[in-house]
Amino acid sequence: MKGLIDILDFSTEELDELIETACDIIENPADYSEKCKGKKLATLFYEPSTRTRLSFEAAMYELGGNVIGFSEANSSSSAKGESVADTAKTISCYADIIAMRHPKEGAALVAKNNASIPVINAGDGGHCHPTQTLADLLTIYREKGGFSGLKIGFCGDLKFGRTVHSLINALSRYEDNEVYLISPDELKLPSYVKKDVLVKQNIKYTQTTDLESVIGELDILYMTRVQRERFFNEEDYLRLKDSYILTEKKLEKAKADLSIMHPLPRVNEISVEIDNDSRACYFKQVLNGKYMRMALILKLLEEAEK
């Protein structure tokens, strides 16, 4: 059964098709208002979420479908000890497609391997977050016109940032991109991502702790928050949480057409004074995420019916 667990599950051609569908949805929303009539999406969220869960729900409703599910582990049978595998088999009896977020890496794959309906990974621990990457790709496409020849800076928590890992994987398949890795030493991009993606694909990258030294080079700045929930002790979190705060002063060195992205939620790593800057794209990402999830749901349900 086809699903989406990792962004690399889809070819670049399939990603192009999703972007084409999303753009058509934007232009012709009425044409899609009953595409999923009679279908049900199950949202299984074992971790807190605002944008991802609600955008999946909004996507399904705007396609004419319905939504069932839960928004916290304690309100599901997992609180009684039910396994992810059994939950996936159970939900397959009730719904047509699943979107699942879970704190453990690999949980979405377990669900996919046991469900009889398509499963979408809505984030599994610090591993990856492919539908956020779909939102990111549509944003980059609409802002830059394509995915090649870009200088992209990833700033903040690159160690636990599953959105960063997914987007680096996605962009690695396009030509002439250059990556800047900006983080404290404690939150560097995992060595396996550097080795398996950047080095293997011969992508030029720069690693630094100083945002201001490279901001003038960037076409895209992808900010991330330092994630309290990924730390084992509060002391380390408090020491690192304010490592990078983007302000108007720091943007003085940036290009006029820089695109500032962030998967949200933000804490304080982007000053609210930047929200009205024409370069701020993070709320555009939110809307783009809904359109790409609509396109994804359509694709997976169509394939399931073949």
Image (tube, rainbow, N blue to C red):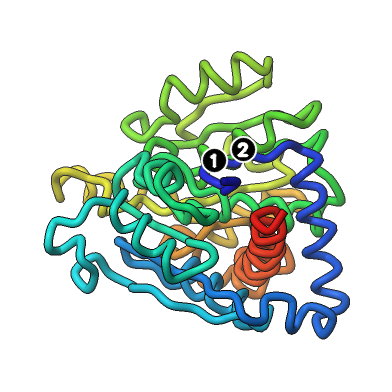
Residue 192 visible in the current orientation: yes
Q: Work out whether residue 92 or residue 158 is closer to the camera in this orientation and state it.
A: 92
Task: Tell me where residue 92 appears, x and y as whole percent.
Answer: 43, 61
Does the image show residue 157? no
- Local packing at callout 1 (Cα closer than 10 Å; few below 14, some 14-19, many 20+) is many
At horizontal 48% and vertical 53% (from top left) the residue drawn is 116
Residue 95: x and y, percent?
48, 69
For label 2, count other residues whose C-alpha is less than 10 Å away and answer few (under 14), some (14-19) or many (20+). Answer: few
**Gap between marks 1 and 2, in whole Å?**
5 Å
Residue 170's disc is none
Q: Residue at x 39, y 35 (%)?
A: 159
The reply to whether the C-beta atoms of the residues labelled 1 and 2 are less than 8 Å apart is yes
Q: Position of residue 119 (x, y in %)?
A: 50, 53
Circle 1 — which element?
A: loop
Image point 62% across, 23% down: which residue? 205
The answer to which quarter of the image holds residue 142 is bottom right
Amino acid type at circle 1 is Asp
Q: Which residue bears the numbered disc 2?
A: 9
Instruction: Give the x, y percent position of residue 282.
Output: 61, 64
Query: Quick check: 285 above or below 186?
Result: below
Count of numbered marks: 2
Q: Residue under circle 1?
A: 6
Query: Closest to the observer: 303 or 179?
Result: 303
36 left or right, relative to 225: right
Left or right relative to 50: residue 56:
right
> Is label 2 in a helix, a strand or a loop?
helix
In this view, 6 is above or below 100: above
116 is higher (above) or lower (below) than 266: above
Given the image, on which type of amino acid does mark 2 rest?
Asp
